[in-house]
Amino acid sequence: MFKNLMLYRLSPEWPASAAQWEEAIANEPFVECSATQQKSTGWVPPRGQEHGALVETVDGQWIARFAIETKAVPADAIRDRTQKAVEEIEKTTGRKPGKKELRDLKDDALIALLPQAFPRRSQVTVWIEPTQRWLVMDVGAQGKADELITSLVRVAGKGFGVGLLQTATSPQAAMAAWLADAEGDALPHAFNIERECELKGSGDEPAVVKFTRHPLQTDEVRQHIAEGKLPTKLALGWAGRVGFMLTQALQLKKIAFQEGVFEEGAKSKDDDRFDADVALSTGELSGLITDLIDALGGEADPTAVTDQAPAAAPAATAERPALATAGADDDGPPF
């Protein structure tokens, strides 16, 4: 069910129940792109059933799903149609279009071609652990995560705050220490280093070294670390049950549950299968995330999410987007 994870922390003041969460996101249901619309976003039933609930509760965990639909028109098609319009103007008026008119012609070409474009839809599964106040997204692209957070800020109402989970030790510093340790004592016992990583140097044109299907606890890797190259991602295993790639931005990618973890769920069907998959995957990942936070020195400050000034939408940086909060004057359900 989960392939890539981004970890967020919800504010302590967040009072919502699953019913309030459902009421809030129901304000932005997903609607397919219209004929001349390039993008549409909104919330869909996580079970995939038409008119189903937008929030499902399984073993105390809340699951929602955010849909993003886009329609793209090839640049060549827009250019060709625009050129034909330009030639027609030159032929009938004897003049060349100015810059503003040319922009308008390109916009007209796009609008004319959009109804013929095929829509592409992707979905982001959202898992809320209400006890820990985690908001976890199954997403690998920061842009999609930002769109989802922006939607939550719009509908959440007063008191809502969310920010990326921060640890006392940065993932990059911890990964470097684990790889540099010749004795293997630095890595917590629940984890093991697998056979893939990327090391990156500093400077304007940094050297990049990638290891794939290669032992990493070697003198060669330690020498790269000693020379100043730092890990940007490292493959790890947890408890012999889950494999994943940890990134310097505290993202978990390429999540793979080991054989046997989902045997119970495989025997279920339809709704029972959904419930089993949610229960098993969130149960395993809850343990993994807890151990990973501990391995990184614990959370830097679990309450820091409330200390920021209100913002209308999350402000993204290259790796760690800022806190997003709903302002005190926002309308919407008490979220």
Image: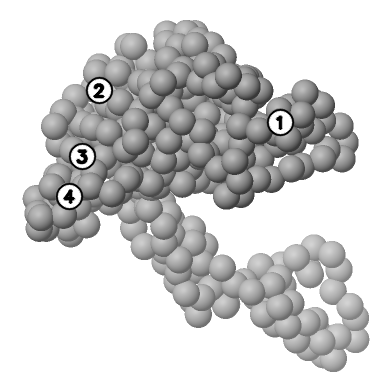
In the figure, 270 relative to 92: above or below? above
User: Could you tell me how far apart the alpha carbons at marks 2 and 4 are, in whole angstroms?
Assistant: 27 Å
User: Could you tell me how far apart the alpha carbons at marks 2 and 3 are, in whole angstroms?
Assistant: 17 Å
User: Could you tell me how far apart the alpha carbons at marks 2 and 1 are, in whole angstroms?
Assistant: 44 Å
Residue located beneath label 1 in the image: 219
User: Could you tell me how far apart the alpha carbons at marks 3 and 1 are, in whole angstroms?
Assistant: 39 Å
Residue 301 image position (x, y, % from top left): 47, 8
Circle 2: residue type: Pro
Of residue 193 and residue 1, the one placed in the foreground of this image is 193
Of residue 145 and residue 282, the one placed in the foreground of this image is 282
Residue located beneath label 4 in the image: 263
> Mark 2 or mark 4, which has the lower sequence index?
2
> Mark 3 or mark 4, which has the lower sequence index?
4
Which mark is drawn over residue 235?
A: none
Which mark is drawn over residue 280?
A: 3
Circle 1: residue type: Asp
Label 2–label 4 contact, CB within 8 A: no
Name the image quarter holding residue 28. top left
Q: Is residue 151 left or right of residue 228?
A: left
| Front of the two marks 2 and 3 | 3
Q: Secondary structure at mark 2?
A: loop
> Mark 4 or mark 1, which has the lower sequence index?
1
For the residue carrying disc 3, how many other residues have a C-alpha within 10 Å: few (<14), some (14-19), or many (20+)?
some
> Mark 3 or mark 1, which has the lower sequence index?
1
Q: Residue at x 46, y 31 (%)?
A: 192
| Front of the two marks 3 and 4 | 4
In the figure, 204 relative to 188: above or below? below
Name the image quarter holding residue 242. top left
